[in-house]
Every structure is written in structure tokens, then in C-alpha cells.
Image (tube, rainbow, N blue to C red):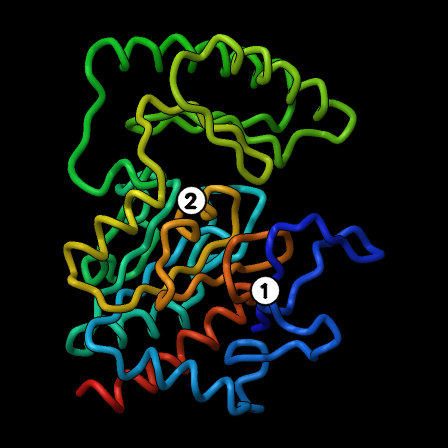
Amino acid sequence: MSEASRDDGSVSADGQAVGGRRTGHDPASEQTPIPGRDPSLPTADDEALIRRLATCYHLLVATDFDGVLAPIVDDPERSRPLPASVDALARLGACPETSVAIVSGRERRQLQAMVPGAERFVLVGSHGAEIDEAEPDGESRALLGRLTAELEALADRYSGFFVEVKALSVAAHFRRVEEVDRSEAVEAVGRLQQDWPAKVVSGKQVVEFTVTSANKGDAIRALSRRAGASVAVYLGDDITDEDAFAVLGPDDVGIKVGPGPTGASWRLESPEAVAGFLRHLADGRSRHRT
């Protein structure tokens, strides 16, 4: 994992955001790897970070699902977390004074079905809205119903357009839309956004219309408060995860997974790298908090 660049618009020759340095560091300094990129080659900084997290009084480890625990796939229903990541989270959750949560844009009931041994973790769905039991009121339910009908009409028009109906929102997915039709489909959804009276959340090839103002930052605040966490670690890959990174305190650790500008202080390259990082963290926490 490398320290991630702040959102300064810097891009490399291939158009990807330039990452790898903590704000204020000499730009000529080397990127600093930490566990996850190459666990077989630990450095002094690797050990210092893991030691700090492993020895803090109460640690909260919270992570997004898609793109972090589970590799991104074309069909959202076929998404599954990497077993190594789930095992490491379970080991962390078994340690004293350690809380583990999965915070996702998916509904909580989906997470319960997709995460093996889901009962071992705190599951937060709908971008933070489903941290407690939540149901839309009659007006919101009617609003979501009308929008769902309009989006399903677009699904009939554009091959690969997928509509995902959730308890508190409805999402339009573009990932499988043919390239020739994608911009037109995005424009059509954009016109619906103009008339939507509540919150719209944009992510990777998806636009979600929601009837709640809650976000992942709200969820992290609530989870930290309830756990009495002295340090929180949050891992995320998407635009919606920036809300969580934004609320982290100076002792907390934000980890951006994949490329792109971010407010997180650290970066991992892939879900596979996340599995390596979580394994190292579980090893350290198990040694120091048992």
C-alpha cells in the first residue's frame, strides 16, 4: 500500500491520479509501501503502522464491500468477497476491544446473503442509511415507485441497463450497457436527476436515487461512537467512500483501494491487496490483544 495523493488533480501520463505520498512530504521522496502490496517485504513503516493499530485500546475496522472485499464484476448479483478477507475480518472481530463493520451501498439483506458468516460483523447498508432498521414512509415509497417505473422503461430501451431496487433507494447501473448507447443512457438518467427532490449518489457506472440524506461518514461516526473506538480504519474504493474518509480523525487511518484522487492517507491497489493488509493486521492484533 502506498500513501495516497490528496485530491489535487495531479494525473500521470496514462490519465490515472498520481498517488503514493503523504501531504507535505518531499515530492522527490520514494513511495512508502505497507502491508498488502507485498507482505513478504515489510519495511520499518509497515511495522510501525501495524503496531500502532494492533496495540491501540479499541480498534474499529470498517470496509466497503464491492471493490474492496469483493472484486468488481459485471453482474452485481454474482459479487462475492474474497475468502481471505472474510477470514481476516473474522479473526479481527474475535480479538478483544476490536469492532468490525461492513459499510456498503447494498442493502443490508444483500450483505447478509453474500457475506459468509455475516452475523459475525456489523452490517451497514444503503450508504449508511441502514445502520438501524429503516423503512421509507408512504410518500417516499410512492416516489421510489414512480422513479423505478421510469428507470425500468430505460432498461427496456438500452440493453445491459440494470435497475436495482433497494429499501431506501433505487439505482441505475450502466456497466453492462453497450459503449455506443452508454452516453445516451447516462443523459437520460441525468434528466431524471433534475427532477428528483431528494439525494442522488453517483458512483462507478451507477447513479443512485435515495430518499435519505445519510452517508458513509454518518455511519463511521455512529459506529465509532457506539464502539468507543480509539482508532478507526476505513477502506473504500468509490466516490461515496470519500464521505467516510472526510470524517476520520488525526489518529484514524483511511485507505483508498484502487486509483483515483482521494482524501484518504493511504492506498491499496486491489481487493487482493486488501486481503494481505487485513491478514497482517489480524496477525498483529491477535498477538497484542489476546
Report the residue that reaches farthest toward the right.
13
Mark 1 secondary-structure assignment: loop
**Which disc, if any, is residue 243?**
2
When the figure is inspected, residue 141 is found, relative to residue 253, above or below; the finding is: above
Q: Is residue 247 left or right of residue 72?
A: left
**x, y percent for residue 230:** 23, 68
Q: Is residue 226 left or right of residue 50?
A: left
The foreground one among 168 and 62 is 62
Mark 1 Cα-neighbour bin, 10 Å: few <14, some 14–19, many ≥20: few
Which residue is identified by label 1?
A: 23
Q: Residue at x 25, y 70 (%)?
A: 59
How far apart are the two marked residues, 2 and 1, measured between alpha carbons?
A: 19 Å
Q: Is residue 107 above or below residue 28?
A: above
Q: Amino acid at mark 1?
A: Thr
Which quarter of the picture shows residue 178?
A: top right
- The amino acid beneath tag 2 is Asp
In depth, the one of 224 and 189 nearer the eye is 224
Residue occupying the point 42% across, 49% down = 246
The N terminus, quarter of image: bottom right
Q: Is residue 192 left or right of residue 130?
A: right
Q: Position of residue 89 (x, y in %)?
A: 31, 69
In primary-sequence order, the first of circles 2 and 1 is 1
Q: Secondary structure at mark 2?
A: helix
